[in-house]
Amino acid sequence: MRTSGLHRSAWAVAVLTLLLVMTGAVNFSNSIASHTPAQGLSPLQLVHRGLAVIVGLLTLTLVYWWSQIQQRPPSGPWFGQLGWSALGLVIAQAALGLTAPSAAVLHAILAQLFFGLSIAIVVVTSQAWSKEAELVDDRMRPPMPTLANLTLILVLIQITLGALVRHKLLGVVSHMGFAVLVALAAMMLGMCVLHQAPEHRRLRSTAIHLMVIVGVQVFLGFSAFILQIMDVETALAGVIVTTAHVATAALTLGATVMLKLEIQRSMRAASPQREGARPTIAN
């Protein structure tokens, strides 16, 4: 019961963090549209700060809760490491929030990182994670964990580029060009998982979710670019599309983190006796 409560709390942190990312994107779009700093806090800014306080308190509760059951932790050392990292990010975000807008770019990037970390906590506190893993032979060269780590790195770089573009510190062309590489890497990772583990329910569903989210993200990114060309990115349609694009970027990171963890847990290197033919990316 205690670990199931921990898992539900982790989900609450993840959902509220996604709302934080979205309200932060809307607030930034509104600040661009007004061209001048707002006098006082708008209702949406108050909501954003209120959500930030709730997320911080929930994260602190999660870490404290873990410390109380660490004699029989729900996910070995995983949650301890993730929990303390999440708490450190919360503290950093609180400090950066007080110095915005001078640290707005870093604040936006860390918000995305915290969401990815919250998804990792959701995974490792689930009941499925505490059960024995259903192992699948990894016949890919390079190995699947390597592909997953590479995809995660590319997603993180793309999120950073996106934040720089949003804050007018980088041109949109490099961001769009790199987006093609990220989309290809994510799609390839998902297809490799489906090819090697077609009957593995968790790997299969997570891979499909990642590919669907990436497809939506590509569409939203293209739509945001068109609206920017039309110079209506600060209109209602532009704000909606941009906010959805930022939110889906967070979901892309979360799905990549989830698939990476599932691959690391469920895929094992194929032994010579089981290996047979080795599919490679080159093929």
Image (cartoon, grey):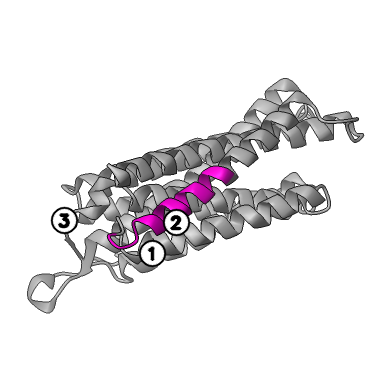
Label 2 environment density (alpha carbons within 10 Å; few <14, some 14–19, many ≥20): some
Q: Are marks 1 and 2 in contact (CB under 8 Å)?
A: yes
Tell me which numbered mark, 3 or 1, is placed earlier along the sequence.
Answer: 3
Q: Nearer the viewer, mark 3 or mark 1?
A: 3
List x then y, in percent, for residue 122. Answer: 39, 47
Q: Amino acid at mark 2?
A: Ala
Q: Which residue is mark 3?
A: 134
Residue type at tag 3: Glu
- How packed mark 3 is, by other alpha carbons closer than 10 Å (few <14, some 14-19, many 20 or more), is few
Circle 1 SS class: helix
Measured as percent of width and height from the top left, residue 123 is found at 35, 49
> What is the chief secondary structure element of the magenta stretch?
helix
Which residue is rendered at x = 34% and y = 50% of the image?
125
Part of the protein shown in magenta: 57-72
State yes or no: residue 253 in magenta.
no
In front: label 1 or label 2: 1
Q: Check residue 147 in the rendering and tell me which mark sits there, or answer none.
A: 1
Q: Earlier in the sequence, mark 1 or mark 2?
A: 1
For residue 148, what is the image quadrant? bottom left
Q: Nearer the viewer, mark 2 or mark 3?
A: 3
What is the x, y in percent for residue 211? 39, 43
| Distance of label 3 from label 1 (alpha carbons) | 20 Å
**Residue 238's quadrant in the figure?**
top right
- Residue, x 72% and y 27% (percent of image)? 44
| Outermost residue toward the left in this view | 273
Q: Which residue is mark 2?
A: 185
User: Which of these two is toward me, 200 or 62?
Assistant: 62
Cα–Cα span, label 2 and label 3: 25 Å
Q: CA distance from mark 1 to mark 2?
A: 8 Å
232 up-or-down from 247: above or below: above
Query: Residue at (68%, 29%) from the top-left corner?
Result: 47
Q: Quadrant of the N terminus?
A: top left
